[in-house]
Image (cartoon, rainbow, N blue to C red):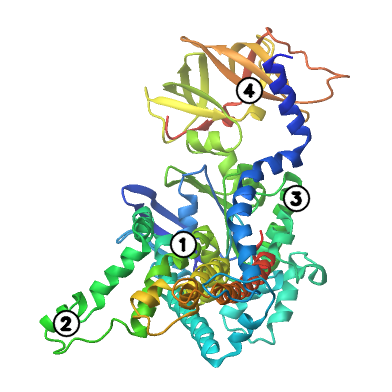
Amino acid sequence: MSEIPVVEFAGVHKTFGAYRAVVDINFQIRKGEFFSILGPSGCGKTTTLRLLAGFEEPDDNGGTVRIAGDVVNKKRPYERNIAMVFQNYALFPHLSVERNIAFGLEMRKVSAADIPGRVKKAMEMVRLDPGQFARRMPAQLSGGQRQRVALARALVLEPTILLLDEPLGAIDLKLRKEMQLELKQLNKSLGTTFVYVTHDQEEALTMSDRIAVMDNARVAQLGTPAEIYECPRTRFVAKFIGESNFFEGVAQSQGPDGWLVEGPGGEFEVPTHAAITQGGKVAIAVRPEWLDIAAPGAAPPGENALRGTVSDVIYLGETLHVLVAIPEGSGDRRVTVAVRNEGQLSRPIRWTKGDAAVVCWKPADCQVLEDA
Amino acid sequence: MNPFALRQAALRWFHRHKETQAWALLAPGFGWLGVFFLAPLLIMFGYSFMPRGEYGGVEAGFTLEHYARFADPLYIKILWRTLLDSTVCTLICLVTGYPVAYVVARATKWRNFLMFLVILPFWTSFLVRTFAMIFLLRDTGLVNTLLINLGVIQEPIIMLYTPFAVMLGLVYGFVPFMVLPIYASLEKLDLSLLEAAEVLGARPAERFFRITLPLSMPGVVAGCLLVFIPALGSFLTSDLLGGAKEILIGNLVQNQFTTARNWPFGSAASFIVMALVLLAVMIYLRARDRGNELGAQ
């Protein structure tokens, strides 16, 4: 990357007393990128955002945070050219909508003559009618409208980086979907770099150019939505993003296309992977939609096939989940197979509880996990 | 009807008659205040319009002379001094109390302990604390002895029985009433608002004057009222620490009821104080309503 990254975290550590909030965080964010930090609560994603905003400083000798190439470790938030949208919006309750939006401009000593025009423009950008809303107080707005004010208050500054801390968490599903698309469009049309913190994996997949998945204070995986979803590197990532089935076993022998793995439910083939060694443990994840279900003996040739019994069929609308119990030494392994719904009234699937079946998948669809 | 069914019926009746229930709950308080507060107040109001009896007490009749006496420059001066002292006391309490409230509200580990220190003076009576101030301030008191022994001064500074001592006593007595409501409003303040202001470019002073102070105004106004009202009616402090040299309207009322035995005039003075207090309360309610309009969320 020849271009200087807008944001760079290099070996960043942050501890609060004895609590290690983030450990060795490394990533670079390109200009104009929609970058999400995704993880469960307590994973360190908010601390990472606060380090970038300047509310927290990295530990001494705890790495560097750079914005546009400059080390900003010790800089206060008001010394960084950033803007932020807070989880609870943090609108000033004693100021009207227009005064809220103007606040940052006033603080940055923008000439008073320019302020009304810029406030109006920002309100239009987030599709809030200035004539209707400019004079209202935050208490007189709905959740979605407050969200838009918070966004306008940040965007009016024309920041190089916009930080968003779970901004859509408190609004209802339909509006959230709408706002996701709007945010994505704003990111592309303004060319502003968006750093978006969320615990909602679907939201992250929908909006992001790249995602940093955080787990237990570290970045577990960094990549595009497709990379994260299709090649999860750890069990955590595979579990946290989408649904996955897990199979374990011991690597027996290496063939031309991969490894033959002996698992408690049967043998299966796994593509060659650096993490696999002869006689070592192997764990793989397979997405439900990449699994197939077939009658015993009817598995397509060349595919992995494990025998089991259908334990349940769940109707989800778009798809059906067929749950199959694969007997393993100590108990059953429950596997979810996603089947496209072609109309249960006209062409119902043939599987019902108690049927003997094989679960099959192409060896290439195995996602080998590094933490076997 | 068995007792259980009776109880059920009564509960159901109350449930349907919410208003009666509310009145039933209010009755003891209203009764107490009516007999021991409102009735004496009305009697005093009546007295303030009646001629003075020869040996104290009142005689039948109607007169406005007691109120008219306040046109006398002597009393206007007392009234004015009382207003001025109460205002100055309120301002000193505000500038000393606000930072205390701010620190206590922001403290995490020590908050309860600091709060305990603020409330501690209430554990002894105001009279005892005022006497303690005498020991502190008199010529052979703690402050003068210390300064003389340290060689800072040769002669004791005369502090007791001066306006300074009165003001010190008033502020000392009333500053907790300023701290508590300001603390309550600062403690509620959402810290993410300050972070939002900081990201938007506000430096510490700007954050204080643009966010913290406006949002703590309800506490400031309540605190000012809680100090101003008792300061207006105070008499003990100017009596003990001021040596009764400068009389405030509170002293006037007290004198009229005790030594001067002019109850009607004392009553009239009381009602003038009360009118001032009501005025202050009205200003407060105005400010609070405006604050609510702005701050409601």
User: Which residue is under mark 1?
Assistant: B180
How far apart, in angstroms, are the residues tagged by discs 4 and 3? Answer: 31 Å
Q: What is the three-letter code of the residue carrying label 4?
A: Thr
For mark 1, give the secondary structure: helix
Q: Chain of mark 1?
A: B
Q: Chain of mark 4?
A: A
Image: A214 above or below B128: above
Q: Nearer the viewer, residue A36 or B91?
A: B91
Residue B143: give x, y in percent of width and height: 21, 78
Tag nearer the camera, 4 or 3:
3
Identified at 23% across, 72% down, the residue is B135
Which corner quadrant of the image does residue A179 belong to? bottom right
* The N terminus of chain B: image quadrant: top right
How far apart, in angstroms, are the residues tagged by discs 2 and 1? Answer: 33 Å
User: Which residue is under mark 3?
Assistant: A175
| Mark 1 crowdedness (10 Å alpha carbons): few <14, some 14-19, many ≥20 | many
